[in-house]
Amino acid sequence: MSNSSFDFNALIRDSKEILKDPKAYFSSMKTTGGIAEPVIKAVVYGLVAGIFAFIWSLLKIGPASYGISGGAVGFMALVWYVVGAVIGLFIGAVILLVISAICKGSTDFESNVRVTAALMVMMPISAFLGFFMGIGITLGTIVSLIVSLYGLYLLYHGLIETLKANAGTSRVLVLVLAALLVIFSLVGIGARKKAASFMGDFNMDQIREFYEDAGNN
């Protein structure tokens, strides 16, 4: 792929390779060639994720099922997924650069941007599996946790294979992040259940007040 002509077939091929064999992919990934390629990659991943979020909002399943949803909200989610992907690419690259520095890896900004763009392959997967949250909060949280843990697995290979970080330090850091993810996910299950219950009661109260007002008039 080059800055002048983006190869979408290569993007699909690379995405499959990242998920199937991250060690092989990151060990041979290019770390130069300009910023345009990873930006386009982030936009594509964000767009695909936004499309899934838009579909789930129309069907009122997934996260959109907890609260007020609809086509307009879904369309805004699609836009924000794309915008968020581009912003997240550069913020994520800075965070990854700091992590890489801690693990004695490369602090070249472009290299970290490219690894971050590759890791964003999890964005559309996470959005697609968001419908599990509509089946059940606990199930949805577990699925989300599994996706996040696999993202950390990809991060580990990106650190040691592409950024040449210290394997031992990277392993410890990733394990710490994984432990924090598990803790926050367990806490989040209770918080999401309370939020869903509150939104359900809030919507029912609104409907009840509407009929009471209509009856009085």
Image: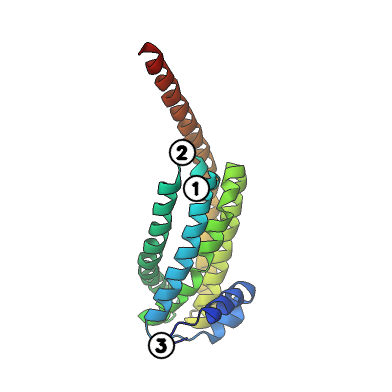
Quick one: 136 or 164, which is closer to the camera? 136
> Which residue is label 1 attached to?
57
Secondary structure beneath label 1: helix
Answer left or right for 128 relative to 203: right
Residue 187 showing in the rendered view = no
Which amino acid is tagged 1?
A: Ser
Mark closest to the chain's N terminus, 3 or 1? 3
Image location (x, y in percent) of residue 126: 54, 58
Residue furthest to the right: 20
Q: Which mark is residue 33?
A: 3
Secondary structure beneath label 2: loop
Foreground mark, 3 or 2, reads 2
Answer left or right for 170 relative to 88: right
Task: Write down the quadrant of residue 217 in the picture.
Answer: top left
How far separated are the C-alphas under marks 3 and 2? 44 Å
Residue furthest to the top: 216
Mark closest to the chain's N terminus, 3 or 2? 3
Foreground mark, 3 or 1, reads 1
How far separated are the C-alphas under marks 1 and 2? 10 Å
Quick one: 1 or 28, which is closer to the camera? 1
Question: Label 2 crowding class (10 Å Cα cut-off): few <14, some 14-19, many 20+?
Answer: some
> Which residue is label 2 attached to?
67
Residue 133 showing in the rendered view = yes
Question: Label 1 crowding class (10 Å Cα cut-off): few <14, some 14-19, many 20+?
Answer: many
Mark closest to the chain's N terminus, 1 or 2? 1
Q: Is residue 188 above or below residue 106?
A: above
